[in-house]
Image: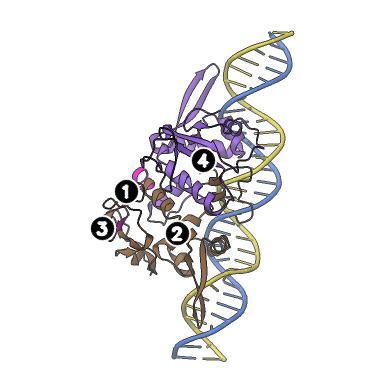
Chain colours: A brown, B purple, C blue, D yellow
Amino acid sequence: MGLGKNYEGQDCSVARSLELVGERWTLLVIRDAIYGVRRFGDFLAHLDAPRAVLAQRLTTLVEAGVLERRRYQDAPPRDEYVLTPMGRELWPVVYLLGRWGERHLSARSRRRFFHMPCDAGLDGNAACTECGAIPELEDIEVRPGPAADHRRTDPVSVALRAPHRLLQPLP
Amino acid sequence: MGLGKNYEGQDCSVARSLELVGERWTLLVIRDAIYGVRRFGDFLAHLDAPRAVLAQRLTTLVEAGVLERRRYQDAPPRDEYVLTPMGRELWPVVYLLGRWGERHLSARSRRRFFHMPCDAGLDGNAACTECGAIPELEDIEVRPGPAADHRRTDPVSVALRAPHRLLQPLP
DNA sequence: TCCCCTAAGTTCGTTCATTGAACCGACGGT
DNA sequence: ACCGTCGGTTCAATGAACGAACTTAGGGGA
């Protein structure tokens, strides 16, 4: 939507946020970036979104300052998309949405998150159940849950079958 | 502006949540329900969404168990939409999205939230800055912030110019 | 009774975003 | 020179959102 998906009349910061991250696919792009996905082709294979939409979403997020696009090799020239601090601050939103869906919409857990220094899970406020702190993304490990789906074969899905630190480059 | 619906291939509870609450307008409907909006016409005037879309979203949310539709008067028959416990659990998501938008996308605060027993604000985890608890919705008051917009004249916007307890019928 | 009003939808033609397939261009390797 | 890969862009078809008009169901006043 880039052009056209606005909630103009709304005097509300929730509406402002949704104009940016409420478009189709966008929050899943951010979820993947939190997991550590960085390259266009990896987003594409993991999300299974249309290429044109993915490209449009990535540039919108870069322009808004949620992602940063940077050169990671020169021959051939290749860019990667990494979360900015602003983008990282969306982690609690993504975590809570996932937790809500897990509790109310799906039978069992697909992925679990652990605060690694403590090796303890996270609660309903994204806080460590052991130390009570809100962990930095770098200190959180994703592990497949009991209801994980093992049928997907794209590199990101395969890499996430093993425990993995958030933000660590994937795959 | 078609936010499509399903993210079928995704083995992820975030995707499951977004299939339900990620459609256009849906999260704003839930925000309004948290504020205390209950009647079709009030949602309509406050959101300024197409009637057909609003009607479809409301029935989807009722079917999913996020809202409950109930008769509040018999002559003439009128129904209202109120949040279920499942719907109320989306408050942290809405709050954090709003906070993120306020911090990164808009100049200043449009609305502020207070834990009333303490008369203290909420922090980045939706916890009371005074007592540290995560307040029940009934104990939270919304107040217009310094950047509030006073141009809208629909009943809900007008009612929100004064402090108001969440979930209390509006307007 | 007749007429007008309100609230809550539904219908329908138009507009606009999403989709998926095909195409493009830069580069590396053989 | 040719092939393959990565990261896009283009384009026709689809389908969701839009907004105005219409419907349904009852209330109240003359």
Q: CA distance from mark 2 to mark 1?
A: 19 Å
Whether residues under marks 2 and 1 lie with C-beta atoms below 8 angstroms apart, the answer is no
Q: Is residue A79 visible?
A: yes
**Inter-mark Cα distance, 4 to 3:** 34 Å
Residue B8, placed above or below residue B88: below
Please, which chain is the residue tagged with disc 2 on?
A
| Amino acid carrying mark 1 in the image | Asp
- Nearer to the camera, B7 or B163: B163
Q: Earlier in the sequence, mark 3 or mark 1?
A: 3
Mark 3 touches mark 2? (CB < 8 Å): no
> Badge 2: few (under 14), some or many (20 or more) residues near its Cα, within 10 Å?
some
Instruction: Give the magenta range.
Output: A101-119
Among numbered discs 2 and 1, the one appearing first in the sequence: 2
Marks 1 and 4 close (CB-CB < 8 Å):
no
Query: Observer-nearest residue: A65 or B150?
Result: B150
Residue marked by disc 4: B112
Label 3, secondary structure: give it. Answer: loop
Res. B7 image quadrant:
bottom left
Determine the residue positioned at 42% across, 47% down: B17
Q: Which residue is mark 2?
A: A88
Q: Nearest to the eye among marks 3 and 1: give it.
A: 3
Work out whether D17 lies above or below B140. below
* Circle 4: residue type: Arg
